[in-house]
Each structure stands twice: as C-alpha cells, then as structure tokens.
Image (spheres, coloured by chain):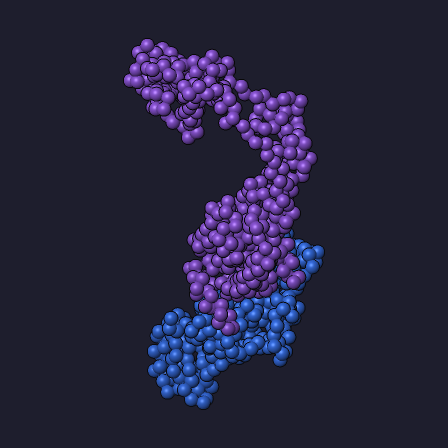
C-alpha cells in the first residue's frame, strides 16, 4: 500500500493548526514523523485516522481515498491509552474486537503477543499493577494484536529500559520486514535513524522537510567537509584552516573536536584534500560531512519558539 | 451496529460484574424475600397492627373499669398508652384523679395542692407532698412528666417537661373532659346522655367501589416507583459521565475513538447503563412481587395496595422510566466528555442534576394533585415528563392522546439529545485541559469538519 497525505489543512475555530501537510510512505517502509511538542503530529495522525475531518486536502491509499475502517490499523498513542483497573488480556480483547476481530481470535493473538513481549504472566493482572515499561509493552501488544497492515507508533520507546527497548526494536524491525507500513513518531532521533527510510519534519503545522532520509542527509552535507586533527584543537585548527585555505574553504561550524567546512568553489574539495597533505596538520578525520538527524531536526525545527 | 454491540456488552458487564452491583441487587432482593416471608413463619400480629396472627383473634383494647368513667357516656372508649407521671391540680374537683387514671391507665396520676406545686413537680419530679414519688417505672416512662391545672371543664393549662413530636396527652385529656362537660350539661337539661352519645357515635357502614383508579391506594407504589427512577437516573446517569471522564483521563479514549465510532461508544454506554439499571430494579421489584404473591395469604392481603400494581402502570413506569433515564444519560455522557478529570464531573453535571431534582420535587409536591395544572405541564416537558406522565397514568385522569403526545415529545428530545450529544461527545472526547463550557461545545459541534 502506498499512503499519500496531500495538503492537509485543519482548523479549530478560527485557528488553523495544520497548514498543508503532505508526505508519503509505502508498505515495507517506515516514515519518521518528527516535530517538536505541539507541532501538529498528533492532529495529523488523527486526521489520518479519520477522527478529525480535514478542512482541505486528502489522504490517499494507492491513489484512492483512504478509509481507515477498510484497513487494519494499529495505533500506539503517545500517552498510554488503556484502562488501568482492567485486566490486561481482557481489555486487549475488547479493543481488538472493536477493530473487527473475533473474541477467540483476539484472545489467542493477545496471548501470543504478550508471550512474545515477555509479559505473558501478566495476562490476568490489572494493568495498574504493572511497571511503566511493562505497561508500555502491553500497549504495544494491543497495537499489534490484530496483525495491522499499518502501524502508527507515537513515542513507543518512552519508559523502556535498554533491554525492553531492544525487544521493541526487534519487533518493529520484524514488522517492517513483514511488509507493514509504519509511521513512527519520536523525539529520540537515534531510533528514527535506525528504522526510517523516509522522514517528515513538522513545525508549526507545516512540513519543513520531507523525503528520503539518506538523500536528506546527503543534501544537508552537500559541499561540506569534516576535518579534525591530532595536533590542533578545534579552535586552533579553525584559525589554521582560515589562514591556509581562506579563498578555498569556509569554516561553517566549529564543533567540540572537529570542523565543518564548506567549499567556496567548484573543485574546492579536491584541491583542499591535496593541499592538506602539504600542511603540518596531522589529520585525524577528513571526509564528506553527513549531518545526524538530530542536527537536521534542530536546524529545521529548533528555531524560534 | 456490531461495534455498538461490543461496546454495550463491555459496558453492561462493567456494571453488573462489580461487587457493589451484585451485592446491592442480591442483597435487596433477598431482604425483600425474607421480610415478605416473615408472616408465613412467625406471628407478627404484635409488631404489625392489622395483621392477624395464625389462629389468634385480635385483641381489642378496652379501657379499664374506672368508676366515674363508666358514668360518663362515651368516655369509656378513650384510652391512652401514655406511660409517665400526670399531675392534676383541680381545685374545683371537676375532673378527679379517678377519671384521669381511667383515660391514662398506664400513667401514674398524682394530685397537687397548688399550681405552683404542679409546675415544680413537672419540672423536677418532686414537690412538697409529692416528694419521693416515682415518675413511672418503665424505661418508656422515665423522665416523662406532665400536668393539668384545671380552671373549669372548658379551661385548663397543660404543663409538660419535654414535649415530644408525637405528644397527644393533652388531646386525649381534652376529649375526656369534653365528654364530662357534655354529660353534665345534658343532665342539666334533662336529656338522656347515653342516648345522645349513642346518636352521635353512629358510624354508617359504607363500601367504596372504585371503578377507575384509586389514588389513595395507588399513592404508595407510585411514590416508591418515582423514588426508584430518581435513584436510577442519579446513580446510573452519573456513572455514564464518570465512565466517559475516566476514559478521557486514562487516555483509553485515544485508542477507542480510533477503533470505533463515537456514536457506538456513547450509545453503547448509555444503553448498557439503562439495561443494568433496569435489570437491577427488575430483580429487586420482581423478588418482592413474587415473594408477596407466595406469602399473600399470610399477610391477609394487607399489602395488596402496594404490590397489586396494574399492568398499565408498570408499563408506563417501564416506558417513561427507560426513556427518561436515556435522555438524562445522554446528557450525562456529553457532560462527561466535556471534562478531562473525573473530579470535575460533579461540578459540570451539577446543573443537570439540579434540573432532575427539581423535576422530582415538583412531581412529589404535586403527587396528591395528579390532575392539577402543574402536573399536566410537567407531564409534557421532556425533562419532567418521565415523572409527571407516569404519575398521571398511575393516579390521575389522562387521555391516550396526552400519553402519546408526551411520549412523542420525549422521544423527539431523546433523538435531538442523542444526535447532538454524539457530536459534542466526539469533539469533547479529544479535548483536554479545563472543562469545556457547554455553550462553546455546542458552537463547535455545529461547525463543519469537526
């Protein structure tokens, strides 16, 4: 399935909160939906799930209007959405039945997922008696119980220790490998980088960057080099580069132990590297600069409040 | 529809599985069964007046033989259960302690030499020559003292230490001296006092045959059923609001609204609450009705006026009760969706509760005037008709068209409340923070694309 969100606009009263959101994602791939708190991620997801109707724009699945009821969707909300005083399996079965499963089938699948996530012994315990991490695993089991074609995970790693995070990572990878369409919203960029081929960054209700993560990184690192030396500290190295290669290279950023450089002419990169050998700089690292997703996110969404 | 069924089932079992629900339902049902079966196993004629014990004849209280009482036609029938001390100051000797002992056979009667002495006796229990006398021996009599200072048979003063709510001593005394006075006056004009009293004492033998409704006998069960509806709306209606607010508070709503339609959610909740409430009421009333029908003979049919509820009245209660509950429950569901925390529910649902309590009180105050204008008005306003029309059907004169019109108005209002309520519910369930004002919610629900 190829899911396309096109120019979604949404207003509450006189306030427009989504100003034309567009992105696309297809089965077997994960999209990282990124944005600061209040950027419009949850509203976008609710429009996608048909909880809110958009004022303009549309959501298409394989070119046709996307009707959530016709698809099996697993949704893991940012804040846990379960009944604290009900038994774990009982509420999983109830929510699975609302999503179209039969009671027996839901019970069987629920038990399997609880076992898979190593919390099978809590099936008949009240949710509130479980630890925060185990509650999050129950939430994930509830998301996956109906074998969804489309999985929306909003901050799935919150509250998980490294061991449980690893279990969840394995599950997410497995689902992507099984050809599921995954929309992944998180502030933890390392997880997004691990799973997502595509990203969309929302800021103040509009997409400020969207596309293939690799391409985005390459584009962000275009004409940029990274340099560090064993015999110069970053500040002094910056002075040295300015003095030696002033007309060829510009120091764009001085990091803690490296410089980000930008070529000023066409063959700057080639000329810089060949000339570098003639200096007294003992090179520790020199190459094409590829920014981290964190850097890209901060650059795109970390501006004004 | 399937999802509505799933929500309904889930919510219904949420109600009926709770310990409090099972405890209250079975507890009350058992209590009714036991209480109504008691006369079949025990002789309760001493506890319940009018209930004849097995094989025993009813004891008739007869005033003791008290000299002068016999001489006063009519006075022999007066007898008070008052236990305690009665002090009499009767300087002219018109009443006499013997007569007083006759009408108060269980009391200790003493005579005071002056009104001051009487007053002191009533106040402290001892006075002058009356010192040392006990003011009654039983627990019932303890501390009970009163006195009569008699000026004439037409004028007296009643002294009492502590006057109880049900104090009838002076009334009995007054009746007694009225007979005395009449007897003396009749003798003065040479009339036969016995004959006059017997003429006055006649009581025509009558029989009332009610061809329509008997408001006097319908009153009790109507009263009880209105109370049942009152508690059901308040308990189950409020539980709908709390349930919605809880789902918002624990964010289960996030998953629910993305899994099913908000209509299924609110309709499922409201109708499950109605079913649970009526199941509970049905079990309790059913247990009482069955138990009474089995034990009716032992009761001698004396509770027929409570338990012989006509089918039409039960039908009116069921229809108007269910619809009334549903109307209020939709409103409660909407109010629950407007808050984010369960502790805000009572604040937001206060005005609705006020409307319902006002409807209940207005109905209660007009219960004895079921054909009055106020009850007619109440029986057509949808928020008051569940009580009002039920009372008119049970106790008053009501035309079929009036019932039909009231029902149509109630159904119409329920539909408006359900459609509007579902819209507000859908919008309110995903809004967090401070409670949303109903006016704002209504405005937002009218906007397109919500």
Residue occupying image coordinates x 53% and y 72%: A53
**A157 w.r.t. A279: above or below:** above
In the foreground, A145 or B261: B261
- Quadrant of the rendering where the N terminus of chain A is positioned: bottom right
The blue one among the chains is A
**B399 w.r.t. B286: above or below:** below
In the picture, measured across the screen, residue A185 lies left or right of residue A180, that is left
**A51 w.r.t. B36: above or below:** below
Residue B332 shows up from this direction: no
Position in image of residue A156 (x %, y %): 54, 62
Q: Colour of chain B?
A: purple
Residue occupying image coordinates x 55% and y 52%: B389
- Quadrant of the rendering where the C terminus of chain A is positioned: bottom left
Residue occupying image coordinates x 53% and y 52%: B388
Residue occupying image coordinates x 65% and y 63%: B1
Position in image of residue A61 (x %, y %): 62, 76
In the picture, measured across the screen, residue B311 lies left or right of residue A208, that is right
């Amino acid at each position: 399935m190829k899911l396309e969100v096109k120019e979604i606009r949404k207003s509450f009263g006189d306030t427009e909160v989504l100003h034309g959101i567009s992105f696309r994602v297809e089965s077997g791939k994960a999209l990282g939906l990124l944005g600061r708190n209040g950027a419009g991620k949850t509203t976008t997801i609710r429009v996608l799930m048909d909880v809110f109707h958009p004022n303009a724009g549309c959501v298409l699945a394989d070119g046709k209007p996307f009707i959530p009821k016709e698809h099996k969707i697993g949704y893991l909300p940012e804040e846990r959405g379960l009944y604290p005083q009900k038994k774990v399996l009982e509420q999983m079965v109830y929510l699975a039945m609302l999503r179209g499963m039969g009671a027996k089938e839901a019970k069987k699948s629920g038990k399997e997922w609880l076992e898979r996530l190593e919390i099978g012994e809590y099936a008949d315990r009240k949710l509130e008696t479980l630890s925060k991490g185990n509650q999050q695993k129950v939430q994930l089991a509830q998301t996956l119980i109906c074998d969804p074609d489309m999985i929306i995970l909003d901050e799935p790693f919150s509250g998980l220790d490294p061991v449980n995070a690893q279990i969840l990572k394995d599950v997410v990878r497995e689902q992507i490998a099984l050809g599921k369409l995954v929309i992944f919203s998180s502030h933890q960029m390392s997880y997004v980088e691990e799973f997502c081929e595509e990203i969309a960054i929302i800021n103040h209700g509009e997409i400020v960057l969207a596309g293939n993560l690799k391409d985005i990184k390459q584009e962000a690192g275009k004409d940029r080099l990274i340099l560090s030396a064993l015999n110069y500290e970053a500040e002094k190295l910056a002075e040295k580069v300015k003095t030696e290669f002033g007309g060829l290279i510009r120091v764009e950023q001085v990091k803690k132990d490296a410089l980000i450089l930008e070529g000023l002419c066409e063959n700057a990169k080639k000329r810089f590297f060949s000339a570098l050998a003639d200096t007294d700089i003992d090179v520790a690292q020199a190459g094409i600069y590829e920014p981290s997703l964190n850097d890209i996110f901060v650059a795109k969404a970390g501006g004004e409040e | 529809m399937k999802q509505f069924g799933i929500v309904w089932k889930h919510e219904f079992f949420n109600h009926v599985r709770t310990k409090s629900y099972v405890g209250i339902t079975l507890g009350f049902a058992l209590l009714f069964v036991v209480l109504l079966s008691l006369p079949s196993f025990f002789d309760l004629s001493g506890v319940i007046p009018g209930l004849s014990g097995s094989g025993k004849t009813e004891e008739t209280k007869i005033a003791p033989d008290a000299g002068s009482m016999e001489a006063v036609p009519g006075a022999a029938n007066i007898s008070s259960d008052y236990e305690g001390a009665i002090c009499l100051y009767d300087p002219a000797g018109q009443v006499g302690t013997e007569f007083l002992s006759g009408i108060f056979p269980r009391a200790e009667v003493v005579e005071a030499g002056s009104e001051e002495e009487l007053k002191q006796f009533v106040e402290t229990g001892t006075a002058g020559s009356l010192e040392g006398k006990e003011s009654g021996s039983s627990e019932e009599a303890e501390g009970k003292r009163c006195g009569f200072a008699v000026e004439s048979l037409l004028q007296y003063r009643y002294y009492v230490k502590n006057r109880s709510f049900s104090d009838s001593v002076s009334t009995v005394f007054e009746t007694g001296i009225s007979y005395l006075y009449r007897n003396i006056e009749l003798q003065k004009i040479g009339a036969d006092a016995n004959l006059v009293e017997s003429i006055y004492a006649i009581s025509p033998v009558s029989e009332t045959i009610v061809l329509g409704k008997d408001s006097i006998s319908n009153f009790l069960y109507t009263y009880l059923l209105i109370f049942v509806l009152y508690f059901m709306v308040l308990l189950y209606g409020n539980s709908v609001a709390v349930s919605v607010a809880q789902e918002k508070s624990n964010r289960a709503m996030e998953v629910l609204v993305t899994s099913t339609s908000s209509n299924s959610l609110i309709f499922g909740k409201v109708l499950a609450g109605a079913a649970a409430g009526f199941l509970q009421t049905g079990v309790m009333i059913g247990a009482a009705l069955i138990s009474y029908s089995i034990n009716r003979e032992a009761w001698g049919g004396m509770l027929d006026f409570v338990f012989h509820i006509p089918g039409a009245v039960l039908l009116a209660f069921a229809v108007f009760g269910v619809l009334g509950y549903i109307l209020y429950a939709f409103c409660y569901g909407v109010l629950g969706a407007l808050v984010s925390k369960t502790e805000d529910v009572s604040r937001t649902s206060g005005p609705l509760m006020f409307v319902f309590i006002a409807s209940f009180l207005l109905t209660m105050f007009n219960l004895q005037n079921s054909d009055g204008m106020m009850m007619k008005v109440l029986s057509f306003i949808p928020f008051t008709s569940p009580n009002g029309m039920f009372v008119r059907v049970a106790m008053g004169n009501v035309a079929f068209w009036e019932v039909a019109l009231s029902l149509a108005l109630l159904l119409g209002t329920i539909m408006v409340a359900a459609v509007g309520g579902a819209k507000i519910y859908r919008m309110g369930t995903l809004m967090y923070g401070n409670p949303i004002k109903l006016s704002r919610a209504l405005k937002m629900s009218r906007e397109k694309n919500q």
